Image (tube, rainbow, N blue to C red):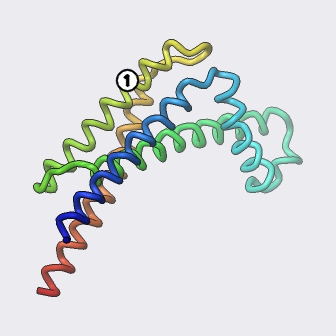
Amino acid sequence: MEEKNTTLKKWIYRILAVLWMVVIFAHSAMDATDSSQESGVVVTFITQHLIPGYEEMDAGQQAKITDTVTIIVRKGAHMAEYAILGFLLAGALEIRHLFILWLVAWMIAIAYAGTDEFHQTFVPGRSGELRDVCVDGAGALIGVSVKIWIEKMKLKKADAMS
């Protein structure tokens, strides 16, 4: 019974990983205007509600803060997207050795990040950036590491109970 549950969980992770890759692809397919508008909503919320005195600043100060927040939001979104993907990939793979699982899941996520950035070179106003692959890889590393840590904790708990 436990083997059936494990197999089912792996398939659920696989389906979710593929669906998440579709979400990432859809975000990458957005042209520069749509992509900027999407992140702009978050940037506007942060600057107007979380930066004290933003409204009283001169236009130059506001522009500097907005530019900084924009970079943080956009790179943070990259990291979050790939942290989720890394987590899902680590759950999807049938590899028992945790280091190999960690490495393979991370490499798959980085490879997908590379293809994603290449895809963006065909989208109007967008470009593929190696630094974004690095940011995506860092996010994937976090996601894979969290999943591996959870698995290690489960193993420790199971060992303690036996």
Q: Secondary structure at mark 1?
A: helix
For the point 71% across and 40% down, the residue is: 65
Q: Residues within 10 Å of mark 1 (few under 14, many from 20)?
A: some
Q: Is residue 142 visible?
A: no
70 vs 119: above or below:
below
Quadrant where the C terminus lies?
Answer: bottom left
93 vs 114: above or below:
below
The residue nearer to you, when weighing 1 against 100, is: 1
Q: Is residue 68 visible?
A: yes
Residue type of the residue flagged with mark 1? Thr
Give residue 32's position: percent from left, percent from top: 64, 21
Residue 131 is left or right of residue 126, and the answer is left
127 vs 142: above or below:
above
The residue wearing badge 1 is 115
Question: Please, which residue is most extreme toward the bottom here?
Answer: 161
Give residue 114's position: percent from left, percent from top: 36, 25
Quadrant where the N terminus lies?
Answer: bottom left
For the point 69% across and 27% down, the residue is: 34
Residue 123 is left or right of residue 14, and the answer is right
Residue 27 is left or right of residue 41, and the answer is left
For the point 78% across and 55% down, the residue is: 49
Report which quarter residue 130 is drawn in: top left
Give residue 7's position: percent from left, percent from top: 23, 58
Question: Please, which residue is most extreme toward the right here?
Answer: 56
Give residue 12's position: percent from left, percent from top: 35, 53
The residue nearer to you, when weighing 7 against 124, is: 7
